Image: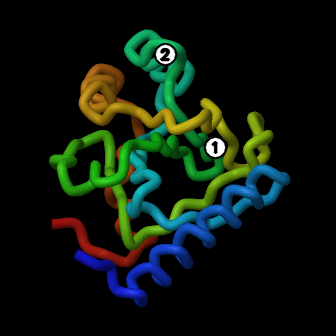
Amino acid sequence: MSIAEVQVRDDMGDLADRIRAYRAIAVQREVRMPLGGSLFDTVITGMGDAAAMVATMDEIQVGACGPVIADPDAGWLYWLVPPGTTARWDPHPYGLCLGAPHILRLPPLARDVPPGPYWLRPCVSDRLLPPVPLRGLLECFRPLPAPHESIAAQLGFPLT
């Protein structure tokens, strides 16, 4: 079996774009990163009691919670979950999962306080948040505001 040359070029271009994006956030620039692919999807929730939610996830995910971005201006948390989670994420009243073709704005890696979006839990290695325990966490804490209507309006698609 062989891989078409065009497919290799497309895959390498995507990889190169992602490496450039990672380097940009490492040197203190905010970047827009495509969701899905081989990196991550995101579950968007209200900030609710963010500190307690992350502390609980620290207990669930031994060694510290995976990456979480806080956006205090919007009132959202972005929990980075494995790619493909969107396809398996059943509707949930407190969390909206997005993958491809959407884009997520990543703050610089060193930004861990406002203003603007910041890393509530930093991006470390290849560690992402496990979606099943995250669903349970959302059911327990019920963080508000629920993101569905606001995000749907921003992205221009109706809720069904």
Q: Which mark is residue 138?
A: none
Q: Quadrant of the N terminus?
A: bottom left
Which is nearer the eye, 41 or 43? 41
Name the amino acid type tagged 2: Asp
How many labels were placed on the picture?
2
Q: Quadrant of the C terminus?
A: bottom left
User: How far apart are labels 1 and 2 at the CA level?
Assistant: 21 Å
What is the secondary structure assignment of the residue under circle 1? loop
Residue in the image at 61% along x and 38% along y = 123
Residue in the image at 58% along x and 42% along y = 69
- Extreme residue toward the right, this view: 27
Which is nearer the eye, 133 or 75? 133
Residue in the image at 36% along x and 61% along y = 99
The part of the image, by quadrant, that contains residue 104 is bottom right
Name the amino acid type tagged 1: Pro
Tell me the crowding category of disc 1: few under 14, some 14 to 19, or many 20 or more residues within 10 angstroms, Cα based. some
Residue under pointer 1: 72
Label 1 close to label 2 by CB (< 8 Å) = no
Task: State how the image is colored.
Answer: rainbow
- Extreme residue toward the front, this view: 1
Q: Which mark is residue 58?
A: 2
Residue in the image at 32% along x and 43% along y = 95
Which is nearer the eye, 5 or 33? 5
Residue 127 in percent (x, y) is at 49, 33
Horizontal side, residue 17 vs residue 142: left or right: right
Which is nearer the eye, 129 or 140? 129
Residue 70 in percent (x, y) is at 60, 41
Residue 133 in percent (x, y) is at 29, 25
Q: Earlier in the sequence, mark 1 or mark 2?
A: 2
